[in-house]
Image: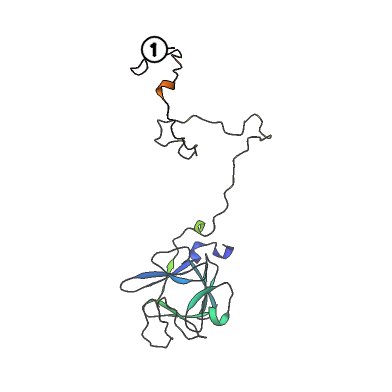
Amino acid sequence: MTDSWGNPDKLTHLYTASERNSYHLQIHYDGRVDGAPRQTVYSALSIKSEEAGYVVITGVKSGRYLCMDKYGNVFGSHFFSHDDCVFKQETLENNHDIYHSTKHRFLLSLKKPKQQFRQGMFLPPYSQFLSMENKIPLTRFNTPQPIRHTRSADDFSDPNNIITPRKTSWDYSASNHNPFQDVWLPRPKDPLRINHNDMVDPDDPEGVVKFKGRRHFKR
Protein backbone atom coordinates (compact mmCIF):
# COMPACT_ATOMS: atom_id res chain seq x y z
CA MET A 1 0.00 0.00 0.00
CA THR A 2 1.20 3.50 -0.69
CA ASP A 3 1.41 6.22 1.93
CA SER A 4 -2.07 7.48 0.97
CA TRP A 5 -3.54 4.34 2.55
CA GLY A 6 -1.41 4.65 5.67
CA ASN A 7 -4.30 5.71 7.91
CA PRO A 8 -6.98 3.03 8.26
CA ASP A 9 -9.53 5.76 9.01
CA LYS A 10 -9.25 6.88 5.38
CA LEU A 11 -10.44 3.50 4.14
CA THR A 12 -14.13 2.88 3.75
CA HIS A 13 -16.50 0.10 2.72
CA LEU A 14 -19.63 0.74 0.66
CA TYR A 15 -22.42 -1.18 2.38
CA THR A 16 -25.76 -1.85 0.72
CA ALA A 17 -28.69 -3.95 1.89
CA SER A 18 -32.20 -5.14 1.15
CA GLU A 19 -34.77 -6.75 3.42
CA ARG A 20 -33.12 -10.15 2.88
CA ASN A 21 -29.41 -9.63 2.25
CA SER A 22 -26.60 -7.16 2.75
CA TYR A 23 -23.32 -6.72 0.88
CA HIS A 24 -20.11 -4.72 0.73
CA LEU A 25 -19.03 -3.68 -2.75
CA GLN A 26 -15.67 -5.24 -3.58
CA ILE A 27 -13.21 -4.93 -6.48
CA HIS A 28 -11.14 -8.03 -7.21
CA TYR A 29 -7.66 -8.37 -8.70
CA ASP A 30 -9.10 -9.53 -12.02
CA GLY A 31 -11.46 -6.54 -12.27
CA ARG A 32 -14.64 -8.29 -11.15
CA VAL A 33 -17.01 -6.21 -9.03
CA ASP A 34 -19.44 -7.97 -6.70
CA GLY A 35 -20.61 -7.97 -3.09
CA ALA A 36 -19.46 -9.71 0.11
CA PRO A 37 -21.61 -10.15 3.24
CA ARG A 38 -18.72 -9.01 5.46
CA GLN A 39 -15.85 -6.60 5.07
CA THR A 40 -12.95 -8.04 3.07
CA VAL A 41 -9.64 -6.69 1.85
CA TYR A 42 -11.29 -6.34 -1.57
CA SER A 43 -14.15 -4.23 -0.22
CA ALA A 44 -11.78 -1.68 1.36
CA LEU A 45 -12.03 1.42 -0.81
CA SER A 46 -10.55 4.86 -1.16
CA ILE A 47 -13.13 7.48 -2.15
CA LYS A 48 -11.59 10.78 -3.23
CA SER A 49 -13.27 13.92 -4.46
CA GLU A 50 -12.54 14.71 -8.10
CA GLU A 51 -14.53 17.94 -8.04
CA ALA A 52 -17.57 19.22 -6.17
CA GLY A 53 -20.11 16.37 -6.03
CA TYR A 54 -17.97 13.93 -8.03
CA VAL A 55 -15.75 11.15 -6.69
CA VAL A 56 -13.23 8.56 -7.82
CA ILE A 57 -13.48 5.15 -6.11
CA THR A 58 -10.45 2.88 -5.91
CA GLY A 59 -10.04 -0.66 -4.58
CA VAL A 60 -7.19 -0.64 -2.08
CA LYS A 61 -6.15 -4.29 -2.41
CA SER A 62 -6.69 -4.64 -6.15
CA GLY A 63 -5.34 -1.20 -7.04
CA ARG A 64 -8.13 -0.79 -9.60
CA TYR A 65 -10.46 2.12 -10.29
CA LEU A 66 -14.18 1.48 -10.16
CA CYS A 67 -15.46 2.18 -13.67
CA MET A 68 -18.64 1.78 -15.71
CA ASP A 69 -19.18 0.87 -19.35
CA LYS A 70 -21.88 2.22 -21.67
CA TYR A 71 -24.26 -0.57 -20.62
CA GLY A 72 -24.06 0.27 -16.93
CA ASN A 73 -21.83 -2.67 -16.02
CA VAL A 74 -19.19 -1.83 -13.42
CA PHE A 75 -15.65 -3.19 -13.47
CA GLY A 76 -12.23 -2.52 -12.00
CA SER A 77 -9.56 -1.01 -14.22
CA HIS A 78 -5.88 -0.18 -13.78
CA PHE A 79 -6.35 2.65 -16.28
CA PHE A 80 -8.22 5.80 -15.31
CA SER A 81 -10.77 7.30 -17.67
CA HIS A 82 -12.63 10.43 -16.66
CA ASP A 83 -15.70 9.36 -18.65
CA ASP A 84 -15.83 5.85 -17.16
CA CYS A 85 -14.33 6.19 -13.67
CA VAL A 86 -15.87 9.36 -12.21
CA PHE A 87 -19.22 9.11 -10.42
CA LYS A 88 -21.61 11.76 -9.23
CA GLN A 89 -22.39 11.25 -5.53
CA GLU A 90 -25.73 12.29 -4.10
CA THR A 91 -26.88 11.96 -0.49
CA LEU A 92 -30.53 11.01 0.06
CA GLU A 93 -32.83 11.98 2.92
CA ASN A 94 -32.19 8.61 4.58
CA ASN A 95 -28.45 9.46 4.69
CA HIS A 96 -27.65 6.81 2.09
CA ASP A 97 -25.57 7.71 -0.97
CA ILE A 98 -26.18 6.90 -4.59
CA TYR A 99 -23.59 7.00 -7.36
CA HIS A 100 -24.25 7.40 -11.06
CA SER A 101 -22.29 8.09 -14.21
CA THR A 102 -22.97 11.39 -15.90
CA LYS A 103 -21.40 10.03 -19.10
CA HIS A 104 -23.33 6.74 -19.36
CA ARG A 105 -26.31 7.84 -17.21
CA PHE A 106 -26.54 4.53 -15.34
CA LEU A 107 -26.93 4.06 -11.62
CA LEU A 108 -24.26 2.20 -9.66
CA SER A 109 -25.90 -0.98 -8.41
CA LEU A 110 -24.92 -4.54 -7.52
CA LYS A 111 -28.15 -5.85 -9.01
CA LYS A 112 -28.96 -6.67 -12.63
CA PRO A 113 -30.37 -5.50 -14.95
CA LYS A 114 -28.81 -2.04 -14.74
CA GLN A 115 -31.07 0.99 -14.77
CA GLN A 116 -30.49 4.45 -16.12
CA PHE A 117 -30.62 7.18 -13.52
CA ARG A 118 -33.51 9.66 -13.47
CA GLN A 119 -34.33 12.16 -10.77
CA GLY A 120 -37.18 10.88 -8.60
CA MET A 121 -36.90 7.33 -9.95
CA PHE A 122 -37.66 4.25 -7.86
CA LEU A 123 -34.25 3.11 -6.72
CA PRO A 124 -33.54 -0.59 -7.32
CA PRO A 125 -32.14 -2.85 -4.59
CA TYR A 126 -28.42 -2.62 -3.80
CA SER A 127 -28.06 0.89 -5.23
CA GLN A 128 -28.14 2.83 -1.96
CA PHE A 129 -24.87 2.76 -0.05
CA LEU A 130 -23.60 3.62 3.40
CA SER A 131 -19.93 4.43 3.94
CA MET A 132 -18.77 2.11 6.71
CA GLU A 133 -15.65 2.46 8.83
CA ASN A 134 -12.85 0.06 8.00
CA LYS A 135 -12.39 -2.75 10.56
CA ILE A 136 -9.62 -4.70 8.81
CA PRO A 137 -6.02 -4.26 10.10
CA LEU A 138 -3.61 -2.65 7.67
CA THR A 139 -1.34 -5.70 7.91
CA ARG A 140 -3.94 -7.57 5.84
CA PHE A 141 -3.26 -5.24 2.92
CA ASN A 142 0.52 -5.09 2.95
CA THR A 143 2.45 -7.51 5.16
CA PRO A 144 6.21 -6.77 5.42
CA GLN A 145 8.61 -9.58 4.67
CA PRO A 146 9.75 -11.18 7.94
CA ILE A 147 13.39 -10.80 8.92
CA ARG A 148 15.28 -14.05 9.38
CA HIS A 149 17.32 -13.99 12.60
CA THR A 150 18.65 -17.54 12.30
CA ARG A 151 22.36 -18.14 11.78
CA SER A 152 24.04 -20.75 9.65
CA ALA A 153 26.01 -23.62 11.15
CA ASP A 154 29.24 -22.19 9.74
CA ASP A 155 28.87 -18.71 11.19
CA PHE A 156 32.47 -17.53 11.57
CA SER A 157 31.38 -14.36 13.38
CA ASP A 158 30.34 -16.53 16.35
CA PRO A 159 32.73 -19.54 16.41
CA ASN A 160 32.10 -20.25 20.10
CA ASN A 161 28.31 -20.13 19.78
CA ILE A 162 28.10 -17.23 22.21
CA ILE A 163 25.42 -15.33 20.31
CA THR A 164 23.64 -18.34 18.88
CA PRO A 165 21.09 -19.63 21.41
CA ARG A 166 21.97 -22.99 22.92
CA LYS A 167 19.75 -25.96 22.37
CA THR A 168 17.58 -26.76 25.35
CA SER A 169 15.92 -29.99 26.30
CA TRP A 170 12.17 -30.23 25.86
CA ASP A 171 10.11 -30.05 29.04
CA TYR A 172 7.40 -32.64 28.42
CA SER A 173 5.64 -31.81 31.66
CA ALA A 174 5.08 -28.21 30.63
CA SER A 175 3.05 -28.94 27.54
CA ASN A 176 1.23 -31.69 25.73
CA HIS A 177 2.69 -30.48 22.46
CA ASN A 178 4.79 -33.03 20.62
CA PRO A 179 8.11 -31.34 19.74
CA PHE A 180 8.60 -33.66 16.80
CA GLN A 181 5.19 -33.30 15.19
CA ASP A 182 6.53 -30.92 12.52
CA VAL A 183 9.54 -33.10 11.65
CA TRP A 184 9.32 -35.17 8.50
CA LEU A 185 10.45 -38.73 9.30
CA PRO A 186 11.17 -41.50 6.77
CA ARG A 187 8.18 -43.65 6.04
CA PRO A 188 8.57 -46.96 7.93
CA LYS A 189 9.23 -49.95 5.75
CA ASP A 190 6.92 -52.92 5.67
CA PRO A 191 7.86 -55.42 8.38
CA LEU A 192 10.00 -58.33 7.21
CA ARG A 193 8.48 -61.78 7.19
CA ILE A 194 10.90 -63.88 9.33
CA ASN A 195 10.84 -67.62 9.83
CA HIS A 196 11.36 -68.49 13.50
CA ASN A 197 13.60 -71.39 12.45
CA ASP A 198 15.96 -68.87 10.86
CA MET A 199 15.86 -66.39 13.75
CA VAL A 200 19.03 -65.99 15.84
CA ASP A 201 18.63 -64.72 19.36
CA PRO A 202 21.54 -62.38 20.18
CA ASP A 203 21.28 -63.44 23.84
CA ASP A 204 21.25 -67.14 22.90
CA PRO A 205 23.16 -67.57 19.64
CA GLU A 206 23.55 -71.33 20.20
CA GLY A 207 19.82 -71.87 20.65
CA VAL A 208 20.09 -73.42 24.07
CA VAL A 209 17.58 -71.22 25.89
CA LYS A 210 13.90 -71.69 25.18
CA PHE A 211 12.44 -69.19 22.67
CA LYS A 212 8.71 -68.64 22.90
CA GLY A 213 7.96 -72.12 24.12
CA ARG A 214 10.05 -73.82 21.44
CA ARG A 215 13.52 -75.39 21.66
CA HIS A 216 16.24 -74.78 19.15
CA PHE A 217 19.03 -77.33 19.32
CA LYS A 218 22.41 -76.90 17.81
CA ARG A 219 23.03 -79.50 15.18
Q: Nearer the viewer, residue 146 or 213?
A: 213
Residue at (57%, 72%) from the top-left corner? 78
Measured as percent of width and height from the top left, residue 70 is found at 51, 84
Q: How many marks?
A: 1
Extreme residue in the right direction: 156
Q: Nearer the viewer, residue 69 or 149?
A: 69
Instruction: Please name the residue that numbered disc 1 is placed on.
Output: 209
Residue at (58%, 79%) from the top-left corner? 81
Q: Nearer the viewer, residue 219 or 121?
A: 219
The quadrant of the image that shows the C terminus is top left
Residue 65 vs residue 159: left or right?
left
Measured as percent of width and height from the top left, residue 129 is found at 41, 74
Q: Count neighbours of disc 1 (C-alpha within 10 A) and say few if under 14, some if 14 to 19, many if 20 or more.
A: some
| Position above or below: 47 against 106 | above
Q: Quadrant of residue 193?
A: top left
Residue 12 vs residue 151: left or right?
left
| Position above or below: 209 against 129 | above
The quadrant of the image that shows the N terminus is bottom right
Measured as percent of width and height from the top left, residue 161 is found at 62, 31
Q: Amino acid at mark 1?
A: Val
Extreme residue in the front direction: 219
Extreme residue in the left direction: 19
Q: Nearer the viewer, residue 216 or 3?
A: 216
Dot 1: what SS? loop
Q: Quadrant of residue 143?
A: bottom right
Measured as percent of width and height from the top left, residue 5 is found at 54, 64
